[in-house]
């Protein structure tokens, strides 16, 4: 049962309590990361991650991708309607140059609540569509904010999103910030991009055990992750564009 304070926040943002508890993904099951577009998964795949605008895959455990701390590059028009919610430095949006995404402004309680209302509706949509869980991307956006955002602000905002996911009956994944034990914020499992490359897989395992979904983009990092954790975790090698017809391999 949600603590009264978090439940009150969730209801204020328009969420309803879940009828059943959220169920995290099974451990040690092969995963396919399909953000670039859906395709029928290989027979060995038990967990599928797709963008929130795609339908879940019948008969698999489905994780809905939501960019909760930054904007998608193709959704800038949407965020221009909410100029006060985009982080700015000297009037210009602060950009994550690696992906061309604007950072969201989570510096005040009011802005965090407004953002949680928008992102929360996407989370609710994932639940209505039949997803089992949600992945909230860019928890560590403060590290790319030119010093404008603080880790404590990310934690406070994350608590609103985990409460919203649980109220909708969804498990929720920590994405990024390997040094943080996200369980204290309400996260149920982790999606770890390139933890083999950056030697971070063990940190996620320390928090979530075998409920860690690993995505690698370089063959040597994939082999490294498989050697260390392939018997325990779901690990997939994908092309960086995660294209529907792109590269896929499993341990």
Image (cartoon, grey):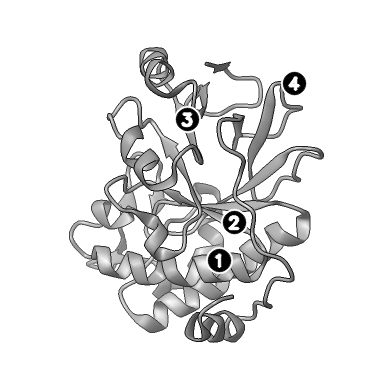
Residue 145, image x, y percentages: 25, 57
Count residues near mark 4 (Cα–Cα under 10 Å), then give few for <14, some for 14-19, many for 20+.
few
Camera-near label (2 vs 1) is: 2
Camera-near label (1 vs 3) is: 3
Please state which of residues 28 and 139 is positioned toward the viewer in this rendering.
28
Residue 202, image x, y percentages: 33, 34
Q: Which mark is residue 171?
A: 2
In the figure, is residue 96 to the left or right of 160?
Answer: left
Q: Which mark is residue 43?
A: 4
Please state which of residues 175 and 109 is positioned toward the viewer in this rendering.
175
Count residues near mark 2 (Cα–Cα under 10 Å), then give few for <14, some for 14-19, many for 20+.
many
- Eyeballing the image, is 123 above or below 37? below
Please name the residue shown 35% across and 26% down the image.
196
Mark 3 or mark 4, which has the lower sequence index? 4
Estimate the spatial distance between the alpha carbons at disc 1 and disc 3, rounded to whole Å: 24 Å
Please name the residue shown 63% across and 63% down the image.
122
Please name the residue shown 56% across and 37% down the image.
27
Count residues near mark 3 (Cα–Cα under 10 Å), then give few for <14, some for 14-19, many for 20+.
many
- Eyeballing the image, is 251 above or below 115? above
Asked if residue 149 shows in the view, the reply is no
């Amino acid at each position: 049962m949600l603590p009264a304070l978090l439940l009150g926040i969730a209801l204020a943002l328009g969420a309803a309590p879940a009828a059943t508890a959220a169920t995290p993904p099974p451990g040690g099951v092969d995963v396919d990361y399909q953000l670039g577009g859906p395709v029928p998964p290989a027979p060995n795949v038990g967990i599928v991650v797709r963008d929130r605008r795609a339908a879940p895959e019948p008969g698999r455990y489905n994780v809905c991708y939501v960019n909760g701390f930054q904007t998608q590059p193709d959704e800038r028009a949407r965020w221009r309607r909410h100029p006060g919610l985009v982080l700015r430095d000297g009037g210009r949006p602060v950009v994550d140059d690696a992906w061309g995404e604007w950072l969201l402004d989570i510096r005040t309680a009011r802005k965090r609540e407004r953002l949680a209302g928008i992102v929360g509706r996407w989370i609710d949509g994932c639940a209505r569509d039949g997803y089992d869980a949600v992945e909230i991307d860019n928890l560590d956006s403060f590290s790319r904010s030119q010093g404008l955002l603080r880790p404590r602000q990310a934690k406070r905002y994350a608590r609103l999103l985990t409460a919203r996911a649980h109220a909708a009956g969804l498990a929720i994944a920590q994405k990024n910030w390997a040094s943080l034990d996200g369980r204290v914020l309400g996260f149920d499992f982790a999606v770890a991009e390139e933890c083999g490359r950056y030697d971070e897989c063990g940190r996620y395992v320390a928090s979530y055990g075998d409920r860690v979904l690993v995505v690698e983009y370089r063959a040597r990092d994939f082999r490294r992750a498989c050697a260390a954790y392939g018997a325990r975790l779901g690990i997939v090698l994908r092309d960086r564009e995660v294209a529907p017809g792109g590269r896929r391999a499993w341990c």
